[in-house]
Structures are given as structure tokens and as C-alpha cells.
Image (tube, rainbow, N blue to C red):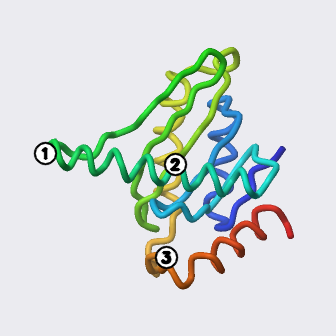
Amino acid sequence: MTVRAVESWTLQPLTDYVHEAGARLVLLMTPAGQVLAQFGFTRAVDVMAAAALGAAIMATTTELARQLGQPPFAALNHQGQRHGIFLSGLTTGRGALVVLAVYDLDVSSLGLVQLFFEQLVTDLRAGSPREGVPKQVLAADFERELNESLSTLFGR
């Protein structure tokens, strides 16, 4: 399985992250859930669901932190018996982004996922475009842009 990217500058950093962290599934997206790159998903509907849920979780925890008078939480981690989920925001020249990574506990660990996430952030910041940050996703453009992103990610 290979990383699929809508924006080419995300391809190598995400490929390196997947291999170093031992991630099973990864999404790189905007806080609105617009997918820029993905790894491990085989169905578009799974990408859409994970992106929507990841964006909603980030929005919810950001609001909870705001209500508590705290800065946004750095990262979230949930672990089950076999899998863990790591969710964190970052900023680049492209703007705010979110990474959602699922990892198998018998292959990787939260420590590895976090360690290599820091390198991913460094690599994405170094490679991100500095000018022409795209406008926020508008409701009128959302479905069209989602379909274009999914078509690019899944080669359709």
C-alpha cells in the first residue's frame, strides 16, 4: 500500500511517517476535514467518515479547552486492546492541519507514533508552500472539493 496525496509536498513526509511509526492508517487533513493525503484506506467512504470524525473530535476538544481557559490540547490518544488512535493538530505554511493515525499495538506504540510525529511536523513545515494559502472550505464548494480530493486519492 502506498501513500496517496492530493498535494505533492505531503507525499514524502507522510510516506516516511507511515514507515517509521508503523502506522496502519493515516489521514492528513485540514481542520474542516478536507483530506490532503492518506494511507491504508481502501474505500472512499472510510476516508470520508474518518476525516469527518477526526475533524469533529479536534473541533470539540479545541472548544472544550477554550471553555476551560486553556490553549488547545496538543494531541489526543485512545487505546483499545489491539489498536491505538493518535490525533493531533499542527501548523504549516499551508495553514492548520490535522493528522489522524491508527496503529497496531503489537507493531508500534504511542511513543513511536509521537516521536515520529515530531519529525513529520518538521518535514511538513519544511516542504509546505509559503504563499497562496487556500481559502477556507465553503459549504458551496465542500462537496465538489471532497469529490475531487477523493478522486485524486483513489485514482478515479
**Mark 3 or mark 2: whose residue is earlier in sequence:** 2
- Is label 3 in a helix, a strand or a loop? loop
Three-letter amino acid code of the residue under disc 2: Gly
Residue under label 1, please give it: 69
Quadrant of the rendering where the N terminus is positioned: top right
Quadrant of the rendering where the C terminus is positioned: bottom right
For the view shown, which residue lies furthest in the left direction? 69
Residue under label 3, please give it: 137
What's the distance in space between the residues labelled 2 and 1, CA to CA? 23 Å
> Which of these two is toward me, 83 or 11?
83
Three-letter amino acid code of the residue under disc 3: Val
- Location of residue 83 in the rendering, given as x and y in whole percent from the top left corner: 63, 24
- Location of residue 63 in the rendering, given as x and y in whole percent from the top left corner: 27, 51
Residue under label 2, please give it: 54
- Location of residue 76 in the rendering, given as x and y in whole percent from the top left corner: 42, 34
**Mark 2 or mark 1: whose residue is earlier in sequence:** 2
- Left or right for 16, reference 156: left
Number of marks in the rendered image: 3
- Is label 1 in a helix, a strand or a loop? loop
- Left or right for 122, reference 65: right
> Which of these two is toward me, 154 or 67?
67
Q: Residue at x 31, y 49 (%)?
A: 62
- Is label 2 in a helix, a strand or a loop? helix
Q: Residue at x 47, y 47 (%)?
A: 121
